[in-house]
Image (spheres, rainbow, N blue to C red):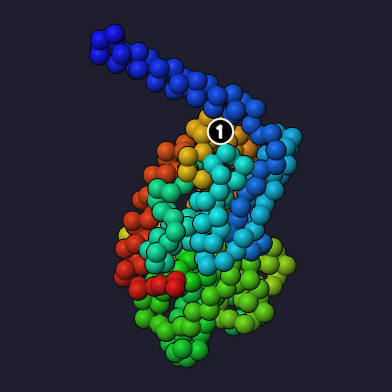
Amino acid sequence: MNKTVITALALVGIVSLNSIANQAFAQGAAAYPQRPIRILVAFPPGGATDILARILAANLTSAWGQTVVVDNRGGAGGTVGSDLVAKATPDGYTLMMVPSGPFTISASTYDNLPFDTATGFASISLLAWVTNAFIVAQNSPINTVQDLIRMAKEKPGQVSNSSSGNGSLHHLAGEVFKRLTGTQMVHVPFKGGGPALVAIATGEVTFGMASIPSAMPLIQAKRVRAIVVTNVKRSSALPDVPTIAEAGVPLPAGLEMREWYGMVAPLKTPEPIIARLNTEMVKIFRRPDVQARLSDMGAEPAGSTPKELAAQIFNDVRTWAKVVKETGVRAN
């Protein structure tokens, strides 16, 4: 048998093996899921990541008749949970809801991460955009951003701001705000948005930035107030609260202080399973009842292809790297 024939047979064999593998993956996706799915949230309960994950988990459970659970694994600004997912078996049964801030910022604020934020995960879909707000306690004398600036200048180093953790978007937003306003404030990090909000409500800190979905229950209970939203437009959930630009502190061009939330899986999760997850998740977040619930919380429903989310992650890692360099923020 000559070399040409051998080569041809080898190619046919490779094609056949690939075809068999693709068919197996397709059959696996068609039967997926066959056991409970875990959505890991790399933060404590109560924050926007947790809230959105639980909305999705409940609807996936109803749609597929298979239990979908939320597993909170907080620590080190979300990097502990991210590492668990990066090392998990890529079979579609371990997923992670990620907030853009800590997920993409960590690539620059932590040294020697055990995973690659930009390329180390399989993207599924962008699911929602969330507006953030500056929050104060209900009984705080601060009613506007200008009140806050004035207090910080009159009492340098005595005004404190909470964040959901070192190196989080809330942390960087506070540092950017200080630079833009020429103020000095004490940063107080917490292990997630929920604990940070409690610190604001109890007066442990002067103010802090929080996502509107996580702050809304305390706003409605009249335990905290929003004095400004950090988006370029007002939030439909808080229409009377001005934007930060309207309050006299315009952000640098191209810098957004709102966050997106998306779903990722371990790298090498089979594409047919990624496609099935994407289709179902996008469908859920397009349902009128889910969109209405998200809108009431201050979240804007979204959907994307896996490639679009991957591009968003890659671009945000680069954007925040520049801000981290300018502010000198480190998480470790």
Location of the C terminus by quadrant is bottom left
Residue under the point 40% across and 17% down:
13
Q: Give residue 92's position: percent from left, percent from top.
A: 58, 39
Residue type at numbered disc 1 = Ile
Q: In the rendered image, which quarter is residue 327 located in?
A: bottom left
Q: Which of the two residues, 123 or 171, is positioned nearer the viewer here?
A: 123
Query: Taking the image as drawn, is residue 93 in sight?
Result: yes
User: Front-most of 220 and 285?
Assistant: 285
Q: Quadrant of residue 33?
A: top right
Look at the numbered disc 1 and give the secondary structure of its residue: helix
Residue furthest bottom in the image: 155
Residue at image location 42% in from the left, 40% down from the top: 308
Q: How many marks?
A: 1
In the rendered structure, the answer to whether residue 222 lies left or right of residue 229 reads: right
User: Residue 193, percent across and down?
Assistant: 59, 66
Q: Is residue 252 visible?
A: no
- Image coordinates of residue 208 in percent, x first then y, are 54, 73
Q: Residue at x 48, y 66 (%)?
A: 168
Residue under the point 53% across and 75% down: 189
Q: Is residue 94 above or below residue 229?
A: above
Q: Which residue is mark 1?
A: 273
10 Å crowding of disc 1: few (<14), some (14-19), many (20+):
many
